[in-house]
Image (cartoon, coloured by chain):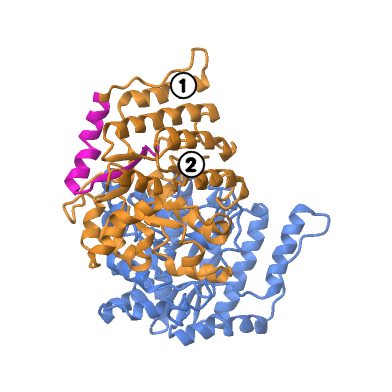
Chain colours: A orange, B blue
Amino acid sequence: MIIDCHGHYTTAPAPHQKFRDAQLKHFTDSSAPPPKPAEISDDEIRATIEENQLKLLKQRGADMTIFSPRASAMAHHEGDEKVSKAWTRACNDLIQRVTDLYPETFVGVCQLPQSPGVPIANSIEELKRCVLDLNMIGCNLNPDPSGGNWTSKPLTDRSWYPFYEAMCELDVPAMIHVSATCNENFHATGAHYINADTTAFMQLLQGDLFRDFPTLKFVIPHGGGAVPYHWGRYRGLADMLKKPDLRQHVMKNVFFDTCVYHQPGIDLLFEVIDVENILFGSEMVGAVRGIDPETGNYFDDTKRYIDRLSIPDARKQQVFEKNARRVYPRLDGILRARGL
Amino acid sequence: MIIDCHGHYTTAPAPHQKFRDAQLKHFTDSSAPPPKPAEISDDEIRATIEENQLKLLKQRGADMTIFSPRASAMAHHEGDEKVSKAWTRACNDLIQRVTDLYPETFVGVCQLPQSPGVPIANSIEELKRCVLDLNMIGCNLNPDPSGGNWTSKPLTDRSWYPFYEAMCELDVPAMIHVSATCNENFHATGAHYINADTTAFMQLLQGDLFRDFPTLKFVIPHGGGAVPYHWGRYRGLADMLKKPDLRQHVMKNVFFDTCVYHQPGIDLLFEVIDVENILFGSEMVGAVRGIDPETGNYFDDTKRYIDRLSIPDARKQQVFEKNARRVYPRLDGILRARGL
């Protein structure tokens, strides 16, 4: 089977965003009572999924998507912790609605109620709720809840450790994924996302996090940011910083997805990164929604690029399925229970 | 001939750094008179150059380096405008000393006296001094003089225009190059440099700067950051933002160097970026100084990667020489005057 590890509910019904708008309005003017999450019917959800992610998934020949709330809408820098909690809960509940409607196609990954300056430990409760009560299999962890001002500590700092302990206990990985930015220097999907991927990898290279958490797993999206293209630089920096070989030091715990939107980029990714560390992902109906005039296909139809690689089918199957089942053990459990 | 467009004086004699230390100390405690730039002999300069950049240049088979002050030491976020001016002047004067000692091998590019919150127009005077009096052929422009806090306006903002006017008038390009960072999230050479390259490109994609400055030229170093690896993403984002094709919109004015420290990265760069837009560069004795155990050669010996490309020699010659002479017209003038 073919599992897309990177999908967001970018097409959520409009009332969901209206709740968010009302919520942020209430944050600055609390004279009225706080708004409640939108009441959304199953049919509304079906319409937004069937015309978009589900249709494209089938057209492109994949079977399943690891699905999470819209990343750019997490916007942890808006409001405060209370606002972030209510918004996050509503977003995660909506993902559960999708996975309940289409259990064979969508499996959930949760957003976290992060907020700048608030301890990450405060996100453990929602992680547990999503994993234990809503059957989700992982989370999206924002290394910069300030939205582009990078006011948090690096991911290797001990302040993150309580959350990593919870992740290990629950046996779930995190995709490291930033959200919108409030710094006009950074276009969200063109700069901030890619920069965050690169930044996170370099933090992990500089530190020794996986010595303390040998079973902790991170997916760095968007093909690992700039890292595979500059793989020689990172190998050389590890050497200069007296770190072990990157395969030992970082790549037992870090995985890159295939959200790289052209053939030469995918070719490079597979040339320099071990196939064990690559998970199929497309982030479809996401950052880049158009059709590439050079190929006539969607930029984000990343399966086509992998199909065209001259590597054995067994290796492609690792990327399409096996690695995802290894990185997301709870997904593997769900699939096994179904005899898959 | 072979021109390396990206070299910094990373091996400047120790008294130069002592001046810097004294200068920053004086900034916080001005009870003593301000320190003066170090007195450095020609022999001291020769020793630092001949054992490093000059030796490696010859060993690797190049002829000339476009040489500028150490990028990580620009540190525009330290001190204030006055401090930055004095430091910048000392750094640029030292570059001139090198180019005077080795006029056939080194040609100068200047640092600018930027300082957070200070108008870039205040850097024009030093640019003019360096170009008109010291025969320099370009400058290093820092898009983030705050050192990782990104408090300036994007490069397409009109606040930068007076400086671009001066650049066009003098017919010099800028390499867009950040410096050290005071944000611990960003390793300087492993994250901040690459992120800045990506960020700058995306700013140029979002804007229409070259409509206002059709002759303005930027070199984005480190192989263009993450951009070539994600070239499909950038083509797709240009499309979504209703911008013209990137070749028309940005790539008449933007050039990438070859500071990508492994063969697959260079292969990708040449596969996706027109050869007209690529300048040979190594940033030797810079971010990555070790030897790649996989090849037995220096990571930053980028000429080897280009030598191994299966493209016609004439195209390599564009990258090794012709593009640099086109992007740096004053260099071309200097070489022509020598009959080269």
Q: Is residue B134 left or right of residue B321?
A: right
Return the residue nearer the eye: A308 or A101.
Answer: A101
* Residue B326, image x, y percentages: 35, 70
Task: Verify whether residue A44 appears in magenta.
Answer: yes
* Residue A208, image x, y percentages: 58, 59
Task: Verify whether residue A45 appears in magenta.
Answer: yes
* Residue A177, image x, y percentages: 43, 46
**Which residue in the protein does label 1 denote?**
A25
| Residue B153: mark in rendering | none
Image point (44%, 70%), residue name: A232
Q: Is mark 2 on a helix, strand or loop?
A: loop
Image point (40%, 61%), residue name: B224
Image point (68%, 68%), residue name: B17
Mark 1 closeness class: few <14, some 14–19, many ≥20 residues within 10 Å:
some
Q: In this view, does B308 lie above or below A108?
A: below
Whether callout 2 and callout 1 share a subunit is answered: yes
Looking at the rendered structure, the kind of residue marked 2 is Asn
Q: Which segment did they paint magenta?
A: A43-72
Image point (27%, 24%), residue name: A42
Between disc 2 and disc 1, whose residue precedes?
A: 1
| Residue A183: mark in rendering | 2
